[in-house]
Amino acid sequence: MGITLAYLGAIVVLPLAALAIRPWELGLSGVWQELTAPRVAAALKLSFGLSAIAALVNAPLGLLLAWTLTRYEFPGRRILDALVDLPFALPTAVAGIALTAIYAPNGPLGAVFAKFGLKTAYSPLGIFIALIFIGLPFVVRAIQPVLQDVDAEVEEAATTLGANALQRAVFVVLPAIAPSLISGVSLAFARAVGEYGSVVFIAGNMPMKTEIAPLLIVIKLEQYDYAGAAAVGLAMVAISFGALVVINAVQIHLAGRGRR
């Protein structure tokens, strides 16, 4: 226990403590002024707003992909299963460059969107696409083992009682995988909030428009504004922690209902 506590203290507690202490060099009014500055507020709103939307979109996408990989056998299934882990293994900068090349106005997919008047790269839509890309594996891998453990006899019993496919999915399978689904969504959200490498290339990084909070922290560090960077980082930690507390409370509630 002593080794574990010492390790956690050095790796987790001390950095968080330093992050919590450093912004107050500015004073309470200085921290408030820093966080309410239009550029900082816009970056925080963009990062958390798009991260939340991307995580929610990844929920049905990840469930559909996990269901397909678990319940069906088809040519190329193993390849598709391996590709799910690609965002884990791919360096984030490489992912950002690849996404930018694909969704740029002269890219293969960006040109198609441009014909419909949609700008993908260098816009919030491009950031949204990158966040979906890096968050989807968390949802799939959280749901997939639970789906594999769902007893097929339970679904067969529901069928004998007259349940159709939609009713089996909603009333039998979904309650069993709901805690894992929420866990996967929360992990995707947490990863998206702090994502830098795969987003910074496709974002365009225009202040007040496509500038994400992690990039703003880097900019402040390059300007030697360490207290200001720490203030933005502390705000991100506080908002993320509050969101995860709510998500965990919902997950525990659903798990308790499932046991009853």
Image: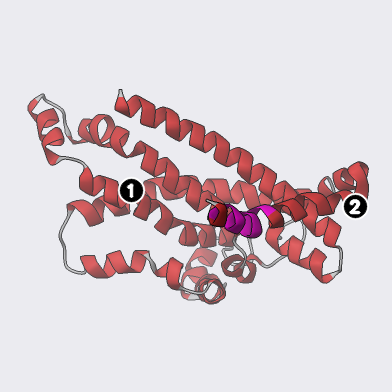
Residue 159 rendering spot, x and y as whole percentages: 11, 31
Residue topped by disc 2: 25
Left or right, 51 with respect to 149, comes to right
Mark 1, mark 2: which one is toward the viewer? 2
Residue 223 position (above or below residue 128): below
Name the image quarter holding the C terminus.
top left
Residue 238 rendering spot, x and y as whole percentages: 69, 43
Left or right, 65 with respect to 194, comes to left
Q: Secondary structure at mark 1?
A: helix
Query: What is the quadrant of residue 141 in the picture?
Result: bottom left
> Which residue type does callout 2 highlight?
Glu
Earlier along the polypeptide chain: callout 1 or callout 2?
2
**Residue drawn at (47%, 61%), measured in percent from left and top?**
133
Residue topped by disc 1: 143
**Residue 202 vs residue 227, the one in the foreground:** 227
Determine contact: label 1, label 2, CB under 8 Å.
Answer: no
> Which residue type does callout 1 highlight?
Ile
**Residue 104 vs residue 208, the one in the foreground:** 208
**Residue 186 vs residue 26, the one in the foreground:** 26
Residue 38 visible, this angle: no
Looking at the rendering, the stretch of residues picked out in magenta corresponds to 4-13
Residue 198 rendering spot, x and y as whole percentages: 56, 68
- In the current view of this chain or complex, which residue is farthest to the front? 2
- In the current view of this chain or complex, which residue is farthest to the left? 160
Majority secondary structure of the magenta segment? helix
